[in-house]
Image (tube, grey):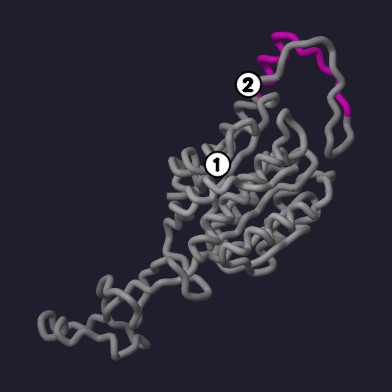
């Protein structure tokens, strides 16, 4: 599949940034500003002195006025950790058009947003054996070419989905806290609730990008068909009449609503996209409205 991003699209991506709603501690200097104590770039605020603070940051003018010790806080420029956690299971190659090419174009666009801003970007691909492919952290625009080459070298996805094992494996490596963007169709028989909650309360700021295909959303009526689960090999014969079609749509909509409600409950960003959506419109319009980029 072609993974090239149009130059015009790249130029537009230069004008946005990954949104971090929390103050996240980076590993080095970057283009972001974080409110931390110390002599840095720009004054931000005061807070009361506590034992262990640098005495050089005490504001003696404030002490003379309020008879209390305060230290100055400054805006320190630092980088953001951006973790891209993308589903590489067999279900992602299904759909018309398939979900995986769309997911990878969105992944590359978000990676470039981070790289262009000086953030540290790390990629984790997962299926049923945890994060089985990892790249990064990358920093700087040149990292995009490495990322494209890495994705092109990946084999055709054939394994089942195990998001829980993937997240446990990801956290076991003790990655630096930051924004975690999980891109998947979330068709995991083990469920998505526990792994997303675990990620949310492990010091990360997660966003869910839920990829669906048009035929999952709106399948067509037809005669009896044999459906094969690409991840387990299990087969089912179905008659796609109006009753079964209505039941399927209700169940699929319920699945999507459950995932969205879980994200809302735990303050996890959520955005859904069909695989026939233009990646440029999704990133620059939908993800901007969802406050993933800004």
The stretch drawn in magenta includes residue 237: yes
Question: Nearest the camera: 264 or 206?
Answer: 206
Q: CA distance from mark 2 to mark 1?
A: 18 Å
Give the residue displayed 52% in from the left and 55% down from the top: 113
Residue at (74% x, 9% y) in the render: 241
**Image height check: is 85 above or below 51?**
above
Nearest the eye: 85 or 268: 85
Say if 254 sits above or below 62 in the image.
above
State the extent of the magenta-drawn residues as a range. 235-251
**Label 1 residue SS:** helix
Residue 190 sits above or below residue 85 on the image: above
Q: Which residue is mark 1?
A: 262
270 with respect to 72 (left or right) = right
Q: Which residue carries the number 2 mark?
A: 250
Magenta highlight on residue 148 = no
Looking at this view, is 79 or 281 the one in front?
281
What secondary structure is marked by label 2? Answer: helix
Q: Position of residue 27 (x, y in %)?
A: 53, 74
Q: Position of residue 237 (x, y in %)?
A: 86, 19
The image quarter in which residue 138 lies: bottom right
Give residue 2's quadrant in the image: top right
Extreme residue in the bottom direction: 55
Q: Residues within 10 Å of mark 1 (few under 14, many from 20)?
A: some
Asked whether, in this view, residue 224 is left or right of residue 105, the answer is right
> Considering only vertical position in the picture, is 183 above or below 118?
above
Q: Position of residue 26 (x, y in %)?
A: 50, 71
Q: Using the image, tell me which numbered label, if any, was put on residue 226.
A: none
Q: Residue at x 84, y 24 (%)?
A: 227
Residue 261 seen in the figure:
no
């Amino acid at each position: 599949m072609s993974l090239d991003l149009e130059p015009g699209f790249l130029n537009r991506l230069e004008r946005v940034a990954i949104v971090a709603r929390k103050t996240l501690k980076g590993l080095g200097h970057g283009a972001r500003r974080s409110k931390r104590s110390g002599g840095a770039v720009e004054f931000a605020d005061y807070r009361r002195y506590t034992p262990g603070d640098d005495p050089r940051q005490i504001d003696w003018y404030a002490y003379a006025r309020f008879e209390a010790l305060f230290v100055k806080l400054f805006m320190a420029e630092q980088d953001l950790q951006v973790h891209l956690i993308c589903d590489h299971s067999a279900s992602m190659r299904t759909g018309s058009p398939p979900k995986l090419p769309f997911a990878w174009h969105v992944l590359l666009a978000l990676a470039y947003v981070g790289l262009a801003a000086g953030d540290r970007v790390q990629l984790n691909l997962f299926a049923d054996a945890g994060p089985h492919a990892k790249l990064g952290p990358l920093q700087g625009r040149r990292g995009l070419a490495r990322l494209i080459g890495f994705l092109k070298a990946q084999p055709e996805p054939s394994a089942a989905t195990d998001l829980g094992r993937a997240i446990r494996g990801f956290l076991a490596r003790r990655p630096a806290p930051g924004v975690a963007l999980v891109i998947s169709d979330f068709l995991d028989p083990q469920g998505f609730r526990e792994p997303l909650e675990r990620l949310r309360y492990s010091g990360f700021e997660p966003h869910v990008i839920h990829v669906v295909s048009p035929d999952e959303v709106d399948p067509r009526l037809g005669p009896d068909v044999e459906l094969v689960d690409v991840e387990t090999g299990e087969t089912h014969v179905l008659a796609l009449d109006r009753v079964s079609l209505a039941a399927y749509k209700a169940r699929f909509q319920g699945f999507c609503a459950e995932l969205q409600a879980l994200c809302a409950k735990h303050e996890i960003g959520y955005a859904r996209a069909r695989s026939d959506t233009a990646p440029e419109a999704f990133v620059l319009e939908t993800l901007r409205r969802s406050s993933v980029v800004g």
